[in-house]
Image (cartoon, rainbow, N blue to C red):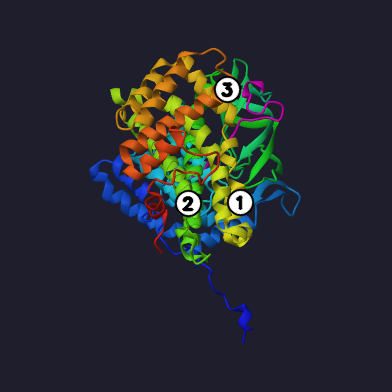
Amino acid sequence: MAPRSHTVTNQPPPLVGYDVFTTDPVLTEAVERHLAPDLRAEVREDLVVLGRAAGSAQVREWGELANANPPRLRTHDRYGRRIDEVAFDPAWHRLLGKSVGAGLTDAWGRPGGHVRRAAGFLVVSQAEAGHGCPVSMTHASVPALRAEPELAEVWVPAATSHVYERELRPVAEKPGALLGMAMTEKQGGSDVRANTTEARPLAADGEYVLTGHKWFCSAPMSDAFLVLAQAPAGLTCFLVPRVLADGSRNAFALQRLKDKLGNRSNASAEVEFDGTTWARRVGEEGRGLATIMGMVAATRVDCVLGSAALMRQAVAQAVHHCTYREAFGGPLADKPLMRNVLADLALESEAATVLGMRLAAAYDAADAGGDHAERERALLRITVPAAKYWVAKRCTPMVAEALECLGGNGYVEESGMPRLLRESPLNSVWEGSGNVQALDVVRALRTEPAALDAFLREVGAARGADHRLDRAIRGLLVELADLDGIEARARRLAERLALVLQGSLLVRWAPPEVADAFCAARLGGDGGGVFGTLPHTLDLRALVERARVEV
């Protein structure tokens, strides 16, 4: 018999065994809003299945195991032959099988494909974020592959397959394939024009051999990689398969795996190309950045979605804990100050999800073609970097505040909150850090007038509905009218663009209490520098209840 002092009381039940999709009204409303009526029932059914899996004890355990047992580099086999492989915990492969099987690499050209895929990505990332890296890059590789029809004929069906197969074999022999990306080098980082990897043409048209290195190669056990290298005509995009058509291994030497802050389940490697590494050109020589930017833009949207997923899981855990945990005579969630904190966290989470799903809807519209498609493509040009900048930046302080809601329990690994916190800075770094995103916003403003016009049309759809939003739009126009010193103001400008867009979307689509709180605190100046400083006159209880998960 346990001593009476060891009786466990006043502890919340674990948040597990629930449907991650249907318990999130913000996400379910977005899916309903952005899909054609004839698609809604089918997509909802698929997302319910995925949502139940993502919230299950089994899949949550897979996430814990994949992070507790990180990947290991195997440069040689037992006989001394070079193999350059990465060994993963079996849980990693189960997670990938679940996500690929759910169609999370299959969006392009599929009716409502980007919205259904974005919702699924947001759902499953709440169970384990690291495996989203190869899922994201495989999905994002399609626009780049389309630049070379012969390659696209082989690789696009493999990339969009719903079958995950872990073995390295020629792509023609596989029912599905994953793709990664290797752009940055140790001397240049984000300045990929400083890349030194050399591509030497072979006799066969479009074939080259590479000599050089990559400082960050994401998901090195993928079947192929999109790589930037210097060809005779300049920086060019190449496809580098791990296994050649004859079944032999390509020269792809893994030097070491990165020991990262978070994202522990996923492997990131340093790679060397030895002068015999075979590559196939993708797009024109000297047009490498233009070719690969479609992939970069799509992965940036996943940075928004991935951050939104971390935010949603963090706020769900915080509200759940505070609903059951009692202190000072009642549930924590009923205490006015804690309610303010939880409501503010819920507000940030909702704004991130609504913005991420709007980007996905723009991709669907752009993919469909027509006049409306051009405007949506222009909208994406400015909103993707602005959204990626702002949502990824907000993720870390938001998750840290949610962790604090659990007190000391949140600082303990078993709560899962430290893993969320370690993961939270990643999306701000991946695919271009904050300055890169802010400067990309400035570049769009300077070179693509249609992008600003599309943005103003989008936010203008809510004009007249809230005086604080109207004032924020006018202030933004004043800011845009003065381009002197704009590079030094680029972060401020990206932030304002993102906040005005979030405000417009919430005013149009969110419940009145949500839109009112956002406009007051984020646009009207009636909020502080930390979470939990919303005006006390708002309907804070409604915001908290909207974020609470029913188990």
Q: Tell me if residue 326 is in the magenta stretch.
A: no
Task: Determine the CA span between mark 3 and mark 1.
Answer: 31 Å
SS for dot 3: strand
- Give the class, few, some or many, for how many residues have Cα within 10 Å of label 3's Cα (few <14, many ≥20): many
Query: Label 1, on which residue?
Result: 265
Q: Are marks 3 and 2 in contact (CB under 8 Å)?
A: no
Quarter placement of the C terminus: bottom left
Q: Are marks 2 and 1 in contact (CB under 8 Å)?
A: no
Q: Which mark is residue 249?
A: none
Viewer can see residue 164: no
Q: Tell me if residue 190 is in the magenta stretch.
A: yes
- Residue 322, given in percent of the width and then of the height, sits at 49, 60
Q: Which residues are magenta?
A: 177-194
Task: Determine the CA span between mark 2 and mark 1.
Answer: 29 Å
Q: Which mark is residue 236?
A: 3
Q: Amino acid at mark 2?
A: Leu
Q: Earlier in the sequence, mark 2 or mark 1?
A: 1
Query: Label 2, on which residue?
Result: 342
SS for dot 2: helix
Is 439 situated left or right of 30 in this image? right
Q: Earlier in the sequence, mark 3 or mark 2?
A: 3
Main SS, magenta residues: loop
